[in-house]
Image (cartoon, grey):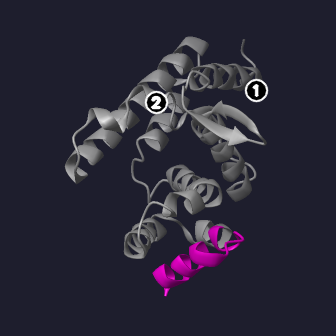
Amino acid sequence: MHDVEALLREAHRRFDALNAEDPRTIDVDGTPRPRELVRANWLERALFEIEPEPSLPLRIASRSQHLARFRVPRSEYPPGREAYLQWRRDLAKMHHELTDAILEELGFSDEVREAVRKIQLKSAIKRNPDVQTMEDALCLAFLRHEFVPFIEDYDDEKVIGILQKTWPKMSPRGHEHALRLPFSGRARELIQRALA
């Protein structure tokens, strides 16, 4: 199997099979679907919205960025910011190792595998265009699909703080797409306050 598109389809098929094992679900048009499978599709759509002709490593990473995330629950770590950051680091390492094993087995080049690694581990985010594009896509997918239910669990100041930390991670292109999202009510008010 040497055709790049065929290789990519097979990689995505394997990523989707792993994400389909997620016992957590998200309701999609009245049907419960595996959460990480749904979120990978959201991320891929956000990527193509921001970058209509993404690189091969970006196309790979868009479906594997959070591969099998459910295998390492946050609840297995103690509370607090340090433990949270360690959880995130451990997750990124796992996502990369699972992805790289699939890419190696399928015969992707070392160059492509290394580029995917940099995206997944967010290496040199402000200097690597693909890493920045992925960050924009991650933020856009979250804002579009998960921000409104997310803010129901937090007070205004907490949400504003999160938005003010998230916004600088995005590029001007990411900002442009995010500002087009049709927020209303409390979500719109909090975004306006955070960016004031």
The quarter of the rendered structure image containing the N terminus is top right
Question: 56 or 149, which lies in front?
Answer: 149
Q: Amino acid at mark 2?
A: Phe
Q: Residues within 10 Å of mark 2 (few under 14, many from 20)?
A: some
Q: Which residues are magenta?
A: 178-196
Residue 160 lies in quadrant: bottom left
Label 1 SS: helix
Question: 29 or 86, which lies in front?
Answer: 29
Residue drawn at x 73%, y 24% is 9
Label 2 SS: helix
Q: Is residue 2 depicted above or below 84 in this figure?
A: above
Q: Is residue 39 magenta?
A: no
x and y percentages locating residue 181 in the rendered image: 69, 69
Q: Is residue 73 depicted above or below 105 in this figure?
A: below
* Side of 157 where 188 appears, left or right: right
Residue drawn at x 45%, y 35% is 117
Residue drawn at x 52%, y 54% is 135
Question: 53 or 28, which lies in front?
Answer: 28
Q: How many marks?
A: 2
x and y percentages locating residue 27 in the rendered image: 68, 40
The residue where tag 2 is placed is: 70
Q: Which mark is residue 111?
A: none
Residue 56 lies in quadrant: top right
Q: Amino acid at mark 1?
A: Glu
The residue where tag 1 is placed is: 5
Q: Residues within 10 Å of mark 1 (few under 14, many from 20)?
A: few
Residue 39 lies in quadrant: top right
Q: Is residue 192 magenta?
A: yes
* Side of 119 where 27 appears, left or right: right
**What type of secondary structure mainly makes up the magenta span?**
helix
